Amino acid sequence: MQCTGSLRHKVPNTNPTMTCSLSSALHANFPEATVPAQQLPVAGWHGLAPFFLTLPLVHATLLYPSVSLHSSLNTGEEGPGGAQPLADGHTWPPRSAPHGQRPAGGPACWPEEGGGRPGKVGRAPWAGSRSKPRCRRRGAGCRGGMGQRRPHEERCSCSNTDCLERPLKRLFEGLGRAVAACPWPFVLLPLLVSGGLGAGFIFLTSLEENDIEEQFTPTSGPAKAERDLVRLHFPTNDSHFFAERLATEGSYAALIAVAAEGGSVLSPEAWQEVRKLDEAVRNSSYRQHCVSIFGICLPANPLVLLPDLSGLDQLRYPVSNGVFLGTALGGVRTNGSGYVESARAIKLLYYLREDGDEAENSRVWLEDFVREFPRTLADLKLTAVQVTYFTSLSRQQEFEGITESVIPLFSVTYFLTITFSIVSCLRLSCIRNNVWLACCGVVSSGLAVVSSFGLLMYCGVPFVVTVTNAPFLILGVGVDDMFIMIASWEQNARKTDIKSRLADTYSEAALSVTVTTLTDVLAFFIGTWTAFPSVKSFCLYTGTAFIFCYIYTMTFFGAIIVLNDKREQGNRHWLTCMPVEQGKTSCLYNACCIGSCSSESSQLKTNETESEHPMSLFFKNYYGPFLTDKWTKLLVVLLYGAYLGGSIYGCTQIREGIDLRNLASDDSYVIPYYDDDDKYFSEYGPRVMVIINETVSYWEEHVREDIETCIEDIENISYVDKNLTESWLRVYILLAKIASVNISNKDVFMNNLSQLFQYYPGFEWDINKTHNEITASRFFIQTVNVTSAIDEKNLLNQLRDKAEQCNISLKVYHPAFIYYDQYLVIVQNTIQNVVVAAGAMLVVALFLIPNPLCCLWVTFAIASVIVGVAGFMTFWDVNLDSISMINLVICIGFSVDFSAHISYAFVTSKESSANKKMIGALHQLGYPVLQGAISTILGVVVLAAAKTYIFRTFFKIMFLVILFGAAHGLVFIPVFLTFFGHFGRSKDQEIRYRNNKDCP
C-alpha cells in the first residue's frame, strides 16, 4: 500500500474505490481517505441525527471548542518516544500515549468517542461523530481487520440513516470546495439577486393591506355572512336614518364630554359648554354632509334638542319619553323614582352620509375634522367639561401609522446585533480579527429580508403591519447561523488547503444550519393554516425569509469567509487590508497593526489552537457540580412545580381576542376616548338585531306564538334587558287588539301594516315585503353589562345557541360581532397550529434522534414551554389573539432548540454516572444555550420600547419563550435527566465495543 501526499490509500486487487468523508478522519483532521467500497461501514442513526439536531444554539460550542483530538494526538516529543510524522505534516500519536491515543507498537487503531479523549470536549456531541466506538487504522479505514467488515456492521434501515448523511455531506463538501475555488461569484450573485428582488418594494404601497376587519377577523366568520343578509333585506337610507339599524358602524365623528372636577354635564355651566361644542361642530360644514330624519339633520344627542334645562328635571333613565338614553348619557345617578339627578358624561355622535358619491365627501370631512378639531377645541377654551374625540376612520388611520413608529427601532436592532457579533468574533490580533465576518453575517440576514420581501411583493402577497416584526426575528436567527459557520471554520484552522478546510466546515456546519431552517420554515408554513390573514401574511414572509437566509449563509457568507482567510494568509490588517510589516520596533505601530507591543508575527499559524472559553469552564467546574447537589435538585423540583402550577393557573385565565384600542399607539388621541367610553358608557352594550331570514306566515297565530317563544328565550339571557326589546310584531298585535282588528287573516295583516308605519316610522325599515309576502323581518334586543372579552364571547355564543334552538330560522347580528367572531376560532386555530407544528417536530425528532427517551424529553420540553408561555403571558397582560398566536407557533421551534442539545448530549454520554453525564452536557452546551438566548433576545429587545401593543406583545412572548426555553435547557431538564440517567449507550453498542478486539 502506498501512502500519497493526500493520504489516499490505494488497495490493490480490490473493486474500484469510492471516496467517503469519515468522521474519524475529520476528528483527527485527516484529508479524505479512499477505501474499497466493500470495506465501507454503514453508520448508524447517529450519523445524520447529530446534524439535523444541531440548531442555532450550538454555535457557541463550535465557537469556543476545547482542545481537540488532533492537538492531543500531536503532543509528546518526536523520535522513538514521540509523535511520528506523516504526509502533509500530520503525526501519529507518541508511543507513550494516554487513553484514547494509539501507543507505538500497539494496535493500528484506537477508539474514538465523541470526537476526543474521555473528559475532553472536541466539539458538539453530534457534530460529525458516531455514537458507536470506531477505530482508525494506518493504511486502511476503521475495520475489524484489513479488508474485512465488522461482524456487527449495519445496513441502511429505519434505525440507521448514515445512508442519508453521506450524500448530504458530500453535497455540502462539494459546495464548500466550489465556494473556496471561486468566491467572488458567490459574493456578487446574492447581491445582484437581492438588488433585483428588492425592486419588488416598489409594489409595497399597493400591497399594504392594513384593513383591521379584513386582517384581524376570521376570513369566513359567521357575522360577515349575517351582515350580507342584513344588507340584502334591510337597505339603509340616509334621508330616513336610524343608527341602530345600520349594517355597519357607519361614518361618524364622536365626542365625549366629561364634567370637570367630578361635576355633572347637566349643570348649567357644563351644559352651556356642551351646547357650545355641538354648535362648533355643526358650523364646520357638517350640515352639508349630515344624515337626516324628517328632513332635518340627525341631532348628535337627543338632549341637545332641548332649548333649555327646564326639561331635565323630568328626565328618566335609561328611557325617557320613548327615547333610549343608555348610550347618550354616562355615569348617571338617579333617585328612587328613576329620575336623573346627575350625569358625568354625554356622548355626541355626528353621522355622515354614505349613499353613492357622498361616502367620499364624508371621508374628506372626517379627515379634516381629525386634523382641525384639536385647534377648534383649543379655541373654545372649555373649562367645565373635558372632551375626547374619535371618528370612524380613527382606528384605521392610527393602525396604519404604527409602522412608522417602529422604523427607528430597526437601526437600533442592527446596531446591537452588529455590536454583539463583533464582540463575539473579536480577536486581539489585528490580522485574525473577524470584525468583517461579523458585519457581513448581519448583512447576509439583511439581504435575506430584502430578497424574500421583494419576491413576495412581486407575487402580490399582501403586506400587513405584523410582517414588520419579521426582520427582528430573522436577524437574530441569521446571526446564530453565522456563528455556526465561523466556529466550524475556526475548528478546522489547522488545514492549510482552503478548499479542504471549507469543505470540512460545510460538512460539519451546513447540516446544522439546514435543520435550523427546516424546523423554523416548517413551523411558519404550518402557521399559514389559519383563519386570520394577518397571521398568514406574517408566516409567509418570515418563512420565505428564513429560506433566503439559509441560501445566503451557504453562499454569500461562505465566500466572505474565504476572502477573509485570504486576507489573513496575506498578513493584511483587518481594517485597512494593508500588509503588516514585521520586525518593527515601534510599540505604537505594533499595537495598531499587530495587536501587541511585540514585534512577532501575528499571522495565523496552522497549528494554533484555541483555548477553552472561561464560560465553558464555569459550567463544568461550578454550575454543573452545583446542580448535582441533592438540595439543589430538590429546590429545582420545587421551582418547577411552582412554574407548572402558575402556568396552568394562567392558562385558565387567558383572555381571548384583540382589544381594538391596542391597534393604536399609546400616545394616540383615541386612547382617552376609549377610556372614557369604557368608564361611562359600558353599562349598555350592543343593540342586537334578531332577524327572521325566511318567509313565514306571520298572520297565523301559532307562528306568532313560536316567534314570541323564541324572543322570550333570547330575553332570558343574563346579558339582555327584556324591558328594552323593540319588536314591531308585539306593537302590531297590541295595536290590533286596541283597534279590534283581526290580523289572523293574511290580507288584513298585510293591508294594515301601513297603519303601523304611521305610528312608528322606523318599523318600516324592519320589514322586507316583496309580492305581498314578508321575506324577512327583524327585532332588536338591548344587551347590558358586556364589559370584557369573556362577556363578549359568552354573549355571542348564547345568542347564537338560542337562535339555533328556535323553530323558526333566526340570525343575530350587530356590527361588533364581526370582531367577536375571533373568539370562536382563536383558541381552535391556536391549538391546531401548535399541535400540528409540535407533531411535525416530534416526527422529525423520532426520525432523527437515535434515542427514544431523548425524543420523550424533547416532547416534554415543547409541551412545558408552551404551557408556561401561554400561562405567564396572561400575567403580563397579553391576550390570546392573532398576534400572540404567531408567537406561540414560533415557541415550538425554539423549544426544540433548547431541549434537543442538552438531552442528546446527556443520553449519548459515556460517563458512568448520571451526574457526570449532566456535568458533561452542561460543559459542552451550557454556554452555547446561554449565548444563543442572549443573541435572540438582542434581536427583539428594542421592541420593548415600542409604543404599540403589537410590537410589545411580540417582545413579551419572545422573551418568555427564550427565558423558559433556556431555563428548561440549563436548569430543569439537566436535573430531571439525572433522575432517569441510566440510559445512554445501548447494550448493543456496548457489545460491539467489547467485541472489537482492535479497539481497547
Image (tube, rainbow, N blue to C red):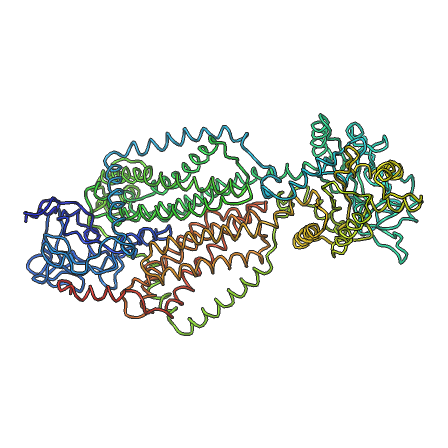
Residue 680 visible (yes or no): no
947 vs 585, left or right, is right
Residue situated furthest top in the rendering: 357
Number of dots carrying numbers: 0
Residue 876, how many percent across, how many down? 57, 56
> Is residue 523 something one can see in this rendering?
yes
Q: Quadrant of residue 131?
A: bottom left
- Nearest the eye: 646 or 230: 230
Classify residue 132 by image quadrant.
Answer: bottom left
Residue 347 screen position, x and y as percent: 79, 43
Q: Nearer the viewer, residue 706 or 870?
A: 706
Which residue is found at the position 43% from the left and 39% from the top? Answer: 544
Q: Residue at x 23, y 59 (%)?
A: 116
Q: Quadrant of the C terminus?
A: bottom left
Above or below 533: residue 44: below
Q: Is residue 581 above or below residue 7?
A: above
- Residue at screen point 37% across, 66% down: 977
Q: Residue 459: image x %, image y %?
A: 47, 31
User: In the picture provided, is 234 more to the left or to the right than 93?
Assistant: right
Q: Nearer the viewer, residue 875 or 627?
A: 875
**As drawn, is 927 to the left or to the right of 396?**
left
Q: Nearer the viewer, residue 427 or 597?
A: 427
Residue pushed farthest bottom? 630
- Quadrant position of residue 75: bottom left
Residue 24 point in image, percent of width and height: 20, 54
